[in-house]
Image: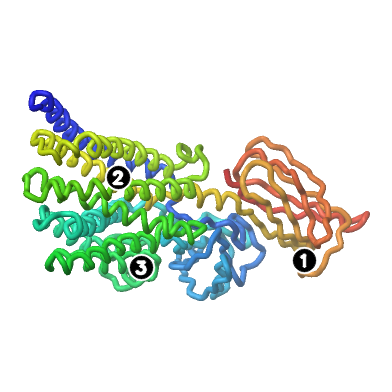
Amino acid sequence: MTAISSPMVDTTSKLSGWLAGGLLALLMAFTVMASTDQAFAHAALIKTDPADGAVLAQAPTRLSLTFSEPVSPLVLTLVKPDGTPLPLTSFRLTDQTVEIDNPQALKSGTHVLSWRVISADGHPVGGSLLFSIGAPSEPPAISEAVDWPLRSAIWIGKVLLYIGLFIGVGGAFALAWLSGERRPGQRFVSAAVLCGLVAAPLSLGFQGLDALGAPLSHLAQPIIWRTGLGTSFGWTVQVALVSLGFGLLSLAGPRRAARPFALAALAGVGAALAASGHASAAEPQWLTRPLVFVHGAGIGFWAGALVPLGLALKRQTADAVVFLHRFSLAILPVVAVLATAGIVLAVIQVQTPSALVGTAYGRLLLVKLALLVFLFTLAAVNRWKLTASVEAGATEVQRRLTRSISVEMLLVLAIFGVAAGWRFTPPPRALAIAAAQPVSVHIHTLQAMADLSITPGHAGQVGASMIIMTGDFGPLDAKEVTLVLSKPDSGIEPLKRAATKPGDGSWRVDNLVIPVPGRWTVRIDILISDFQIVKIEAPVDIRP
């Protein structure tokens, strides 16, 4: 047995070293992959008034931003042509629209409306739009540089919080329910819990900084912490702190009293993850939130048991075989539920196979899936090839299993790193919702005005709907309406389509094909009488 298994020990040892080095490379690759998409947010801006790039005859009294889902404003600033920022503090929320009052008369030139809101999944959304009064001028400079120190801090905080919840609380559960009288690895588990207790509040502060677009140097400001606490991630941190507290109580007390605390702590892990995040915000939430709950609790059960079990086997304690037997019996249904929940959540988030390679979220998921295949394969070998021999007393096989568990632990840490990268990548589900939203533009002249909506607002086959009115918002009984789209910079001559009137007061153009994305010029020709035609036009941005 020894002669046969020694090469396996060497191979596993080399594999552990390779994975340790590969983990660093993987995390560096994550940074590159996650930064390929510039959109960090997950609620999409679908309509503005005035439209981005619009040139207005006079200053608007009201500004509005419409998103693909409900949001909460954080920072609204109007930057004047001379670069002076004007905070906008008077606004109203109506469904998915933020209506903003303009506090003062604006002079001619190009203005920038800079906005930052929090989306339903707890992640901040930021952007800006330009509009001009009278004639355009040189727009004021707005910095859009990525704050890499803050971004790195958010990622590190996320990984450390995972370690506290999954390895710390999960380890406390394993020591209370699976191990024997001894508690192998209790110091390590306690350190992991303390790591989570530090990471949780820090992550809340980082969330506040990110929400307000502030640098790390502003971390001590009270408004940063109030803002972070006001997001849905604030609930995750609060539940996580309670869970970590229960985990510490289970480690500090006697075994009989530890079990209920450990069970409550593990339930808290699932609840913390279900309180915020991409998957929890997805519809239908009656399905996604419970799935996130069981997924989080399952990860805690599995990952938390690895270090205590590995140390028990390495030290060959009297309870090591009992610990292994209990874990091997329980892990099969746990993994089945864990895998099922993960698959369903992945399908909801990704939706189409092409999104696996076409989005940063999908590429991170592919990396995670590759690590999971390796992890499940290794776990299957441990469960069906090595466990029975260890329970029978094979010492050399016990050493092999210990080394194999250490490799599992490295894989779990790598998966934590990849999962933390999702904080910066919108899921394909959210991108698809945004892509399906219409683009709208309001065209207003003294002679006539129109509200134009193109659905969906991306290149391809679309439909257009127009409400035609007089310049003073009165009814306009047009004889004919023609929609004209052109994009001279791409060599696309005007596309003319006659509109029909379905009877609901609007004019429609169906089966219209917009071949390429970008900024188009839209013109509406309104035939008022046999001798009068009014032409109004404006730019419209078509998404890819």
Q: Residues within 10 Å of mark 1 (few under 14, many from 20)?
A: some
Residue in front for this viewpoint, 108 or 436: 436
Instruction: For mark 3, give the secondary structure.
Output: helix
Q: Quadrant of residue 253?
A: bottom left
Q: Quadrant of the N terminus?
A: top left
> Mark 1 and mark 2: span between their CA atoms?
59 Å
Which amino acid type corresponds to the residue marked 3 in the rendered image? Answer: Trp
Q: In the rendered view, does 200 fall on the left or right side of 423?
A: left
Disc 3 vs disc 2: Cβ atoms closer than 8 Å?
Answer: no
The residue indicated by pointer 3 is: 235
Residue mark closest to the camera, 3 vs 1: 3
Residue in front for this viewpoint, 277 or 106: 277
Residue 117 position, x and y percent, is 46, 64
N-terminal of the two: label 1 or label 2? 2
Residue 137 position, x and y percent, is 55, 56
Q: In the rendered view, does 343 fall on the left or right side of 502?
A: left
> Mark 3 and mark 1: span between their CA atoms?
49 Å
- Residue 56's tag is none
Which amino acid type corresponds to the residue marked 1 in the rendered image? Answer: Gly
Residue 236 position, x and y percent, is 34, 64
N-terminal of the two: label 3 or label 2? 3
